Amino acid sequence: MARTVLITGASGGIGAAVAWAAADHGYRVLTAGRDATRIDQVCAGIPRSSPVLLDLRNPTDVLESLAEVDRLEAIVHCAGVAEAASVEETPYSRWLETLTINVAAAAEITRALLPALRKAVGHVVFVSAAPGLHAVPRWSAYTASKAGLRELADALREEEARHGLRVTTIYQGGTATELLQKVRAKFGRPYHAADCIQPATLASVVLTVLDMRDDAYLPEVSVLPTPRP
């Protein structure tokens, strides 16, 4: 029986790369996102993949989409938003959207699928942000959400240890995605894809984490771009 993995944010650069890598490792892949057209495009050509429409702005609605999942070997949380703005410029609606998509939705999806994860003695992977990220001016909503995601992962790891679940947070540096390009443009910083971690490289780390032997696992992993002379 094929192992099953759910990947959120699968229409993004990292999520799509993880979906391809998971399929290459023999997983049945549930590719989740809110844009039906983009998710269908990601699924095209990926063996054993199925689209799942999830709008993480309304996480309580995910239960219906995932109701038929009764066994799940892994969730990889890749979805996220990263708008840059000062505290003065960030309205409540932006705070709510950022914290909902980046933290609360991950918690709700995981909560809904805990029975399926426990049945498979599965693994939850949170793709987070650069290691040590904190207190970045004009990025408070994003950094606050990533601090919350770290706390969610750490609490879940302790709570679910008695069920044998593994929980991993991956802290990655700049990865060559459309989102990073937009963020750096907002901050007036250069973006050179060749100097960044490639999505396929990060995906290979995710699959290394998932496919470790049962006697050990990695609770935290930091992935940084190779320095350029």
Image (spheres, helix red, strand yellow):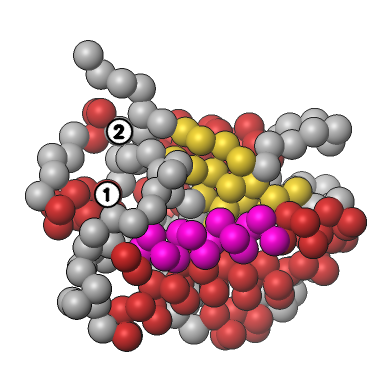
The picture quadrant where one finds residue 138 is bottom left
Residue at (65, 81) in percent of width and height: 63
In the rendered structure, the answer to whether residue 164 lies left or right of residue 87 reads right
Whether residue 155 can be seen here: yes
Residue at the (19%, 49%) spot, across then down:
184
The location of residue 4, given as percent across then percent down, is: 71, 53
Query: Which residue is found at the position 38% from the left and 53% from the top?
Result: 134
Q: Quadrant of residue 141?
A: bottom left
Q: Which residues are magenta?
A: 142-155
Residue picked out by circle 1: 180
Q: Earlier in the sequence, mark 2 or mark 1?
A: 1
Q: How many marks?
A: 2
Q: Position of residue 218 (x, y in %)?
A: 68, 37
Against 107, is 201 above or below? above
Q: Is residue 35 left or right of residue 103?
A: left
- State how far apart marks 2 and 1 are (Cα): 10 Å
Point out the image quarter for the C terminus. Answer: top left
Give, as a three-letter code, the residue at label 1.
Leu
Q: Quadrant of residue 70?
A: bottom right
Tag 2: amino acid: Cys
Residue at (75, 48) in percent of width and height: 166
Does residue 49 appear anywhere in the picture? no
Q: Which mark is residue 114?
A: none
Extreme left residue here? 188
The answer to if 41 sits in the magenta stretch is: no
- Pointer 2: what residue? 196
| Magenta region, main secondary structure | helix
